[in-house]
Image: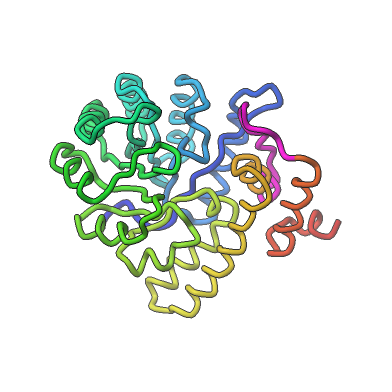
Amino acid sequence: MSDFQGVYTAPPTPLTADDELNEAVLREIIECHIGAGVEGFWMAGGGGESVLLDDEENHRIAQIVADQAAGRAKVIMHVGTASTRRAAKNAEAAAEAGVDAICCVPPFFYRQPNAAVVEHYREVAAATGLPFFSYNLPQMTQCEITPPLMAKIQDAVPELRGVKHSGPNFADVRAFSHMGLDTFIGLSPQFLPALASGACGVIDGWPGVAPEIWIEIWRAWNDGDFAAAQAAQDRGIELAKLFEIAHFHGVLKAATGYRWGLDCGNPRPPGLPLTPEQDRAVQQHLAKLDLLPAARAAS
């Protein structure tokens, strides 16, 4: 059985009013999630706004989370950039910080042939020797890691351990798991069907708002209680409808903040803060699902 499995959260990167990394709140988020029972963290990925952060900020996130988790949960740090050189340097910094694994989107912006994607991953993974996870997010990167491409990556990258699959082709969950990869579904409303297709766990932003929902799915599935798993998945789908209110980063930061009593700040520009109406809609949605502190839910 793999040591990478279960419910991993992908927290937002909390920022101060001056648009600086908020270390204190980040540590609180990590502590709250560990207390809730998550198995690990996927840091500074899509939900963590990594491509909008300075390299030094990403390096500091790796240091903070590795220190705060202190072996109580796995830390997978995203190091991806459009540049192979920068991504490899980010990987080295993450390894020095003490993370358990690194993850990386394929090179983006300039469309690259498959051979360049494979070489990019080979160099980034070789920079540390840590377990390596590919991040399949073609909606943003314009590069889809298909099973044939993954087979080429697997042949060239001995450090490859698994993949976070956030792509549109759900059948690839089965294909990747059959390749022996630790396959995390990156779209949490699909967690239960992904488990049935061979996924080893879930990684997404919404489990960080209410980890107990996805932990219940995971435990019920492993206990063979499919009805309980379905009921929890239905609740998770309702929570993820928060995405319909406004842009993902603003909603994720607001929902995380209201759930745990923390100020995660606004999105990093060019991301926009929520309007007052959108902010109220987030609170109302959380209250409907009984996911607000009692005092706020009653107000």
Residue 289, image quadrant: bottom right
Magenta span dominant secondary structure: loop
- Residue drawn at the location 77% of the way across and 59% of the way down: 294
The answer to which of 165 and 48 lies nearer the viewer is: 165
Quarter of the image containing the C terminus?
bottom right
Query: How is the protein colored in the picture?
Result: rainbow
Residue 102 percent location from the top left of the image: 33, 36
- Residue 12 place in picture, x, y as percent: 56, 39
- Vertical placement of 122 versus 298: above or below? above
**In the rendered image, which quarter contains the N terminus?**
bottom left
Looking at the image, can residue 145 be seen? yes
Along the viewing direction, whichever of 254 and 6 lies nearer the viewer = 254
In the figure, 133 relative to 268: above or below?
A: below
Residue at 37 percent of width and 71 percent of height: 222
Q: Position of residue 111 (x, y in %)?
A: 33, 30
Asked whether residue 268 is drawn in magenta, I would say yes
Total labels drawn: 0
Residue beneath the point at 40% across and 36% down: 141
- Is 152 or 68 nearer to us in this picture? 152
Please indicate whether residue 275 sits to the left or right of residue 146 in the image: right
Q: Is residue 72 left or right of residue 177?
A: right
Can residue 1 be seen?
A: no
* Left or right of 101 on screen, residue 282: right
Residue at x 23%, y 29% (from the top left corner)? 116
Please identify the residue farthest to the right as the structure is shown: 299
The magenta span reads 257-274
- Examine the structure image and report whether residue 144 is included in the region drawn in magenta: no
In the rendered image, residue 247, in percent from the top left (x then y), is placed at 63, 42
